Image: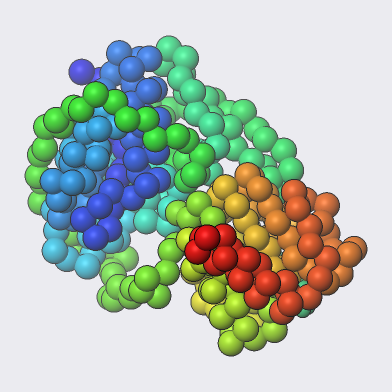
Amino acid sequence: MRRIVIIAEHSDGRLKRYSAELASKAVSLAEGAGASVAAVVVGDISDEITRSLGSCGVAKVICLDSKSLDARSGCAIAKALCELITRESAFAVIATDTPFAADAMSRAAMRLGVSLATDCVAISLNEEKIFVTRPIYGGKALADIEIAGIPRMALLRANVFPIGVRKDVSPEVERIELKIPETGARVKELREAEPGMLDVAEADRIVAGGRGVGNSENFKLLRELASAIGAAVGASRAAVDAGFISHDHQVGQTGKVVNPSLYIACGISGAIQHLAGMRTSKVIVAINKDPEAQIFAKCDYGIVGDLFEVLPALTAAVRKIVKD
Ligand SMILES: Cc1cc2nc3c(=O)[nH]c(=O)nc-3n(C[C@H](O)[C@H](O)[C@H](O)COP(=O)(O)OP(=O)(O)OC[C@H]3O[C@@H](n4cnc5c(N)ncnc54)[C@H](O)[C@@H]3O)c2cc1C
């Protein structure tokens, strides 16, 4: 049977939420094409990961097994992916637009001589043709594109597609040893992001701070609100460049693209490069002491005020609601 191949990611023995979104979308595309979905998973897989993929309707799970740090390198995965694409008669390969998948997918596309559509916010299939929608010009316009070449390759933005729970499928599981090439990029070290902190790329709520936060110590105010509402902490590039917070929190053109239900921007002016990373958030709240700040033109709710007064009041109000 013809396949759509996806790359599914996991951590702590659980399928990432964005991979469940990807699997659900891939399954609905495959159903329309009389095909099925095979998920490629790198590293050890738990029964829970297999079950989660099964509940999205994935027919087969291919585990690329390796204990090597180089299993995180796109070189090894790209090579394995190319072999699987041929073996599985894959007419499409899709993954979530994460640094991990983008590394492997771009290398695989180069090896296969096909194009790769990145940052897609919509995908549809019409007979053999696959169409995607991508934001362009920093998110000011949307381009509809037909992907050329076989297989069609695309990276989908996280937090865009709903998770569809299907009747339980028990996927076939195959384990393959991931071969690490002698040459190419090597992974020397893996460092955990701040333990216990949600990743902005996955979060459904984000409290983000900019230069207006003033210093790293003051980010405590944002962390308190974030913890009260179950949000991740994001940042503008100015805050990251000033050393207030690490780069993995940066949202924007040269940071992460996010799409949460709620984005609270504190002391952020709303530069186009920041908006490029968060303008599709469902509800945007801006806290800024400058009534002329650009962010007010893009937000759903604007609070003109000093974040050092507004944030503690907001956190206290949320805690009161939760307590009551
Ligand atoms: C190629 C390129 C790529 C870039 N990529 C990114 C990117 O990925 N992400 C990104 O964010 N930027 C990016 N930038 C930078 C971008 O242009 C802006 O410089 C940056 O977003 C500004 O960050 P900011 O809003 O925190 O700072 P500022 O523009 O300095 O704004 C600070 C805001 O805080 C407000 N403020 C100050 N004190 C308070 C207070 N006490 N209470 C409330 N409000 C207060 C001020 O009124 C002001 O509006 C990029 C730029 C370039 C050229």
**Does 222 sit above or below residue 323?**
below
Residue 305 falls in image quadrant? bottom right
Q: Is residue 129 left or right of residue 314?
A: left
Residue 111 spot, x, y in % from top left? 34, 43
| Left or right of 137, for residue 144 | left
Q: Position of residue 223 (x, y in %)?
A: 53, 74
Q: Is residue 88 visible?
A: no
Where residue 247 appears, as percent x and y from the top left, is: 53, 72
State the residue at coordinates (20%, 18%).
1
Examine the image and state in which quarter residue 59 appears.
top left
Task: Identify which residue is drawn at 65% across, 33% down.
Answer: 143
Query: Is residue 259 placed above or below 130 in the rendered structure?
Result: below
Q: Nearer the viewer, residue 183 or 127?
A: 127
Taking 299 as reference, is 156 left or right? left
The residue shown at (34%, 40%) is 20
Q: State how the image is colored.
A: rainbow
In-front residue for pair 291/187: 291
**Looking at the image, residue 149 lies above or below residue 265:** above
Q: Nearer the viewer, residue 144 or 24?
A: 24
Kindly give the residue lying farthest to the right in the view shown: 292
Viewed as shown, does residue 21 lie left or right of 49?
right
Q: Quadrant of ligand 1?
A: bottom right
